[in-house]
Image: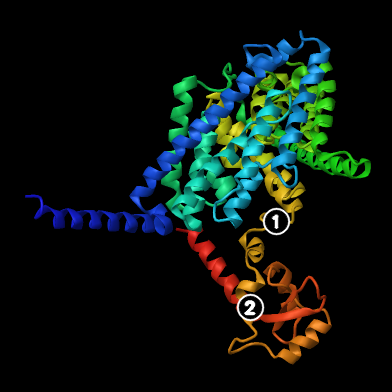
Amino acid sequence: MDQPDRPFLSRYLTHAVTRSRDGLRVLRHRGPSQIQFWFLALAIGIGAGFAALGFRLGINALQAALYGTEDVQNLHSFAESLPWYLILLIPIGGGLLVGLILHRFTDDGRVRAVADVIEGAALRDGRVETREGFASMAASLITLSSGGSSGREGPVVHMAGMISTWVCNRIHADGITGRDLLGCAVAAAVSASFNAPIAGALFALEVVLRHFAVHAFAPIVIASVAGTVINRLNFGDVAEFTLITPGPLQFYVELPAFLILGLVCGIVAAVLMRSIFFAEDVGGVIQDRTGLPRWLRPAVAGALLGGLAIFYPHIIGVGYETTLSALKGQILLHEAIVFTMLKVAAVAITFGGRMGGGVFSPSLMVGALTGLAFGWIATSILPEVSGIHTLYAFAGMGAVAAAVLGAPISTTLIVFELTGDWQIGLAVMVSVSMSTALASRLVDRSFFLTQLERRDIHLAAGPQAYLLSMFQAGGIMRASDHARAADPERCAALIADGICVTPSSTLETAMPMLERSEDGFVPVVILDKDDATPRLVGALFHIDALMAYNRALAATAAEEHS
């Protein structure tokens, strides 16, 4: 009786398998334009949202266990009552664990964060490092729980990148699909971490993908909303900072003050960023000259942080309590100035010691303190035409953070969403625009892009600069047996003059040689281990390099404008 049904069932199953394969192939290469892609974005958003939530709860639990407090939001007030040796030893122990983890699971002892995600989006088809990422996640969790002065957005963003990387590798996604999935994961993680759906979506577009292509907008928004829902299911629909709404803004009179505040915040942001880079350089020099083991470097930084926290526990951790106090105007002028300098020093020590964490939350605290100090001064000079001083703290918080991230749009929105106050947007926008314009000229656009520039990854100048590093000579060269190969005798002469590249050399290295070459090509050689004599394997022609470069530029432009 079943015999007549078997051919039909077989055809049905074959048809279903074929349709599934076709759907997967479309999703790999034309995913962002497909409705199915939105469901995948939703799934990634849920996964990244739960990961961000788990990371935040993990920090709270470990921090409460280490310091013995149930209210981690008021950690520094509680820490004032602790014995001094505990405040000193907890960061040292945390730094030691961080050093051992990074030494064991990373090649360079460096924590992965937002800059590495930006690099993955630009140069690795939306992929990030996984093994190093897990180590960085653990290191950052310990750092933020044991007194390190940094933020949680860096590890959260990279953790989201690992989730999207796993999905991309499973479906063998191409570059466009991989980048958009990465943007979805980042948006969800930021939204879940800060309860900021609008800013989460724009952060992914503005900072990570660095374009606002229409095809990426819908799936990223879907993922961002998913991350926000996960946050609100746990913490409720409440803002990170609950504020008393400031008085009305005397806009036309106070506008020059907010323009000046923006410039001040731009300088402070540049000082914060350069202090971090200076501390990293000093830490590297000390490590090289003293022979300090790599795994011990974070513990030394922990000792410095612990010693500072004995007298000023305000520097411990993310610093939400101090930030909120500044936004409420509960910190005096001299305290705001001192706390600003101490926080900058603490952040520099944390990053210089390679302890882990992000820079966004510290920049919020530094900005709020800077704005409050400016507000105390401005309102005392012209009290009859000024609003309240906390308004300047609010604007300063956004101005410093925007300059550090190099993201004026998403930072402006995330400050609004963190506070739930939309009434003073003009003051924030004015300050943010001035601080970003100034700070971007004092560093390479932003903290993250400057980090990459210091590693010789030139993303700040745009695709016309970094695309050259994506092509290797071995993939473009004409082999020696090519129909239009270079003249062997001329190649030998160029090799004798030292004009040659290896197959692994990038166009970034080869282009200057090609532009100076009168032959229109440079030889490609392999250096054998046992024989120092270069072995000719082909030649890289100028025209071939330009064609590959132009195709990459065209593909990038097409993606950004689709």
* Residue occupying the point 49% across, 33% down: 49
Decide: few, some or many residues near mark 2? Use Cα within 10 Å; few <14, some 14-19, many ≥20. Answer: many
Q: In which image quadrant can residue 324 be found?
A: top right
The answer to whether 49 is drawn above or below residue 552 in the figure is above
Q: Does any portion of residue 194 appear in the rendered image?
A: no
- Measured from the top left, where is residue 91 in percent x and y? 77, 24
Residue sitting at x 49%, y 59%: 559
- Mark 1 sits on what residue? 457
Tell me which residue sits at (79%, 23%) in the image: 339
- The mark that comes first in sequence, 1 or 2, is 1
Left or right relative to 473: residue 16: left
Whole-percent x, y for residue 197 in the image? 48, 34
Whole-percent x, y for residue 291 in the image = 90, 42
Tell me the distance, in whole angstroms, between the alpha carbons under discs 1 and 2.
23 Å
Q: Residue at x 47, y 36 (%)?
A: 47
Nearer to us: label 1 or label 2 = 2
| SS at mark 1 in the image | loop
Quarter of the figure that contains the C terminus: bottom left
| Label placed on residue 477 | 2
In depth, the one of 346 and 125 nearer the eye is 125
Towards the viewer: 1 or 545: 1
Left or right side of 559 for 378: right
Q: Which mark is residue 253?
A: none
- Labels in figure, total: 2
Amino acid of disc 2: Met
Q: Is residue 268 above or below residue 238?
A: below
